[in-house]
Structure formats: structure tokens, C-alpha cells
Image (cartoon, helix red, strand yellow):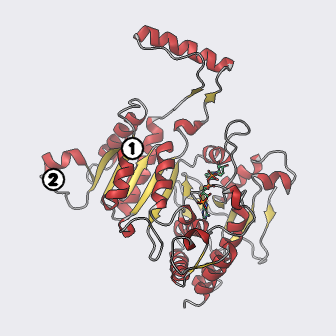
Amino acid sequence: MTVDNNSSGHAGKIIEWNPDGEPRVPEMPIISFIEGDGIGPDIWAAARPVFDAAVEQAYGGKRRIIWRELPAGEKAQKVFGLKTPLPEDTIKEIARYGVAIKGPLTTPVGGGYRSLNVALRQSLDLYACVRPVRHLPGIPSPLRHPERMNMVIFRENTEDVYAGVEWPAGSSEAGELLELINKLLTDAGSPLLSPECAVGIKPMSESGTRRLVRVAVLHALENGCKSVTLVHKGNIMKYTEGAFRDWGYALAREEFPGQTIAEKELQEKFGGRVPRGRIVIKDRIADAMFQQILLRPEEYDVIATPNLNGDYLSDAAAAQVGGLGMAPGGNLGDKCALFEATHGTAPKYAGQDKVNPGSLILSGVEMLRFLGWKEAAKMIVEALVKTIAQGVVTYDLARQIKGAREVKCSQFGAGVVENIKNAY
Ligand code: NAP
């Protein structure tokens, strides 16, 4: 079931994908959206007019997005009367239309259904979660030099503990696994696990790592970045996170031999100087990386990291450049892309028209760049910065900017639209 929100009367076209993973974008592409739960409807209502205004302003009606709503989350059940919060048709339609944008979806802690977000990323094989962390002028920050932060985090999106392979304590499955594991541990002469344990599995593969690191290196090469840092916890989890590091270095060495250089080879081969045209591949232990992004963010411009590290790191990094209300993202695969903010449904603010739609607006900016509609993307960023410079901000930024005028989510969105219309 889909809801056609195409009030413009224009017939949209499907975005096709080349075999090399490049989208072929028509002038009037159909783009699916999911409003999301909690604050999702508020931020979507504020963000969509911003996208439409920028596209109209940039291309004078020659280009237009034909929006198509897909049901998911609480709305799928409460409004559309569907049985499941993630209908099969929704997944199929996202795959069919190739590019989509969504609000956050609720995942209960503990029992209940599996995370809808994780299910979407896995079913669509959206293996790279890409989260840019950039400081925009005028955005408050706890740092003295937030402008030094300018990185893109590539978080592996389909493996690791997010694969959802776990069993509760006391279940027969956990019991069977513990029995098998304890037999292997006995043979190895290692201490045994308590039979009371819950069990979760952390699968990580060479192919999963290589495709993630590949897109990170390609991004670095295409954007003139200086380095790609593999962030892992390989000192403790040697065969998963440690292997992530080794597979990452191997990928760079084998597929980009003339364009990359491992940090540890710099000294012995090039006297410590980075040869022209090469990016440095380095690695850092995840816990130390949290210190690095606070103290020396300018040394890191592209991060490639397993799923859980990436989740933690991107929220922490976002705090340095305005917080979750300003943190965009996108999930990329080889035949599909789904853009969404870093944050969740913030249920305590649901329906209050209060939160910052900047996160979703900037996710849309990433989507427009991905479509190649760079002029519209640029217009939105400029208008957003101008709105904040005018002292018009939502509660999250208002509490950090002296003298700012706190406005509602919808008013902030309207302010950005106004600045787009007045810009040229
Ligand atoms: P959250 O929804 O990200 O919210 C945590 C806090 O971040 C909020 O209380 C608020 O901080 C701030 N925040 C989030 N979005 C904001 C915005 N647009 N503007 C301003 N501030 C914003 O995290 P959570 O409360 O832990 O998670 C709630 C639900 O979301 C859970 O069910 C979780 O599973 C789900 N989730 C979904 C996704 C997704 O759909 N991709 C991602 C993460 C979490 P203050 O309290 O300081 O104002």
C-alpha cells in the first residue's frame, strides 16, 4: 500500500541504477518517504517544504521531486490499518524507487519486534551508514574550535551485534549454545561461561568489511581527503574487530595500491612525508578515538568502523557540532539509498512541534547531493545557516545561544523556506 502525495499532477519517473552503483536521476524522480514515529511527523512536515522550495528555486520548475508516502512504524498500523509496522510492500517499494528518506522509527528495548531500522537496512542491503559531521557557522558547541571537526563516518550497517542473533538467558537456544561453547572452552583449557548467560553473536565478515572500507576510500579519493581511519576494538575482540582492521588495510593495499599508504609504512618508505596524491590509511582503537575527536578532530576526515562503534561515535561526534538535532545521515547500498537523521523518535517531544528539523533537512541535503542536485543542496545549507544567524532556532540550540529566539519546529522550517525564496 502506498499513498500518492503527488498533488502537483506531474508523472514522476523511477530512478534507475547503473551496474556500477551510480543512480540515473530523471528530472522528476519519484522519491519515497516514511514519516516515522515520535517526532518524525513534526520534522518531516517542516523539512519537506524546504526540499521543495530549494528544488523549485534552483531549477525553476524544470526539476521536481514527486513524493510517495510509504507506510511504516506506528502509522502503518494506526492510520493505514496494516498488521505489521514494516510491511513487505514498503521494503519492495523502497527498492523499486531506489531513493527514499525517512523519519525515525521506534524500537522497544527488550522484547517486542526487532528494530525496524535494522530490518530495513538489512533487507535492502544498505551496507554503509554515512554520517557527515561538519560544523556549520553559528552553531553552538561545547568546543573552543568546533570548526576543526569535518569528518564523514562510514558505519558498517548490516553485521556486528546488530545482526540480531541473540537469545535470552534461560532459553533452550542459549542453553544449547552455552553447552557447545563450554565444550570448546574446556578443550582449549579456558574458563567456562555461566549457564545463566544470555547469548548474543557478533558476526563480521571479510566481504562485509571490504565493501564498507571500499566506499570510504572512494569517498576520500573523490573528495580530496587526507586519510581514512579504521576505528576498531581489535585489542579485545581480535577475530572480529581486529580482523576488521586487517581486512581494511588489505583492501586498501590490494585495490588502491597507488592511491593509499598505510600510516606505519610512511616513515620507512617515505621518511614520514605523505606522497602526493595518496591518502593515509590508519587505525585507532575505538575508546581512544573518542578522545581523539575531542582533542585533535582535524586529524580525521574519513572514518570506517563496525556497526556498534559507528553508532556510538556518530552521536558523540554530533554533540560537538550542534547535537542530534543537527546530525544527518544516509544508508547506502549498491542499488538503493535511504536517508535519515542520526537520532531516534525522541518520544517525550512527540507531537509538540518543538524539536529541531535540521537533522532531517540536512539528511535531505545529503540526498540532493547524492542525486547530483548540488545547487539545491547548497541553497538549503546557506538558508539554514542564515536562519540560525538571524537568531531563529529551536529549543536545543536556543538553550546554547544567548539572546536567540526559540521557535517551533515548523517555524524554523518556514524560516529556512523564507530564506531560500529570498536568496536569489
Ligand atoms: P533519541 O530519540 O535520539 O533522543 C535522545 C535525545 O536527543 C532527545 O531526548 C533530545 O535531547 C535529542 N534529540 C533527538 N532528536 C532531536 C531533534 N530533532 N532536535 C533536538 N534534539 C533532539 O534517542 P532515544 O530517546 O534513546 O530513542 C528513542 C527511540 O528512537 C527508541 O525507540 C530508539 O530505538 C529509536 N531510534 C530510532 C532510530 C532510527 O529510526 N534511525 C535511531 C535511534 C533511535 P534532549 O532530551 O536533551 O532535548
Q: Residue at x 55, y 80 (%)?
A: 404
**Three-letter amino acid code of the residue under disc 1:** Asp
User: Residue 108: x percent and y percent?
Assistant: 70, 43
Q: In front: mark 2 or mark 1? A: 1
Q: Ligand 1 near label 2 (Cβ, under 8 Å)?
A: no
Q: Is residue 352 found left or right of 16 in the rendered image? A: right
The quadrant of the picture occupied by the N terminus is bottom right
Q: Which of the two discs, 2 and 1, labels the residue nearer the N terminus?
A: 2
Note whether 410 is above or below 80 in the view shown. Answer: below
Q: Which mark is residue 386?
A: none
Q: Which dot marks residue 272? A: 2
SS at mark 2 in the image: loop
Tell me residue 239's x, y (percent). Answer: 40, 29
Give left or right: position of 217 versus 173: left
Label 2, label 1: how far apart the Cα atoms are: 26 Å
Pick the quarter of the image with the C terminus.
bottom right
| Residue 377 in sight here | yes
Relative to 204, residue 49 above or below = below
Does the Cβ of the disc 1 residue fall within 8 Å of ligand 1?
no
Are there few (<14), some (14-19), or many (20+) residues within 10 Å of tag 2? Answer: few
Mark 1 secondary-structure assignment = helix
Query: On residue 287, which mark appears?
Result: 1
Counting labels gives 2
Mark 2 vs 1: CB contact within 8 A = no
Q: Position of residue 229 (x, y in %)?
A: 35, 50
Q: Residues within 10 Å of mark 1 (few under 14, many from 20)?
A: few
Write the residue at 60% across / 19% down: 196
The amino acid marked with disc number 2 is Gly
Rendered location of residue 44, percent (x, y): 69, 67
Quarter holding residue 268: top left
Q: Is 25 left or right of 67, judged from the image as shown?
A: left
Ligand 1: image quarter: bottom right
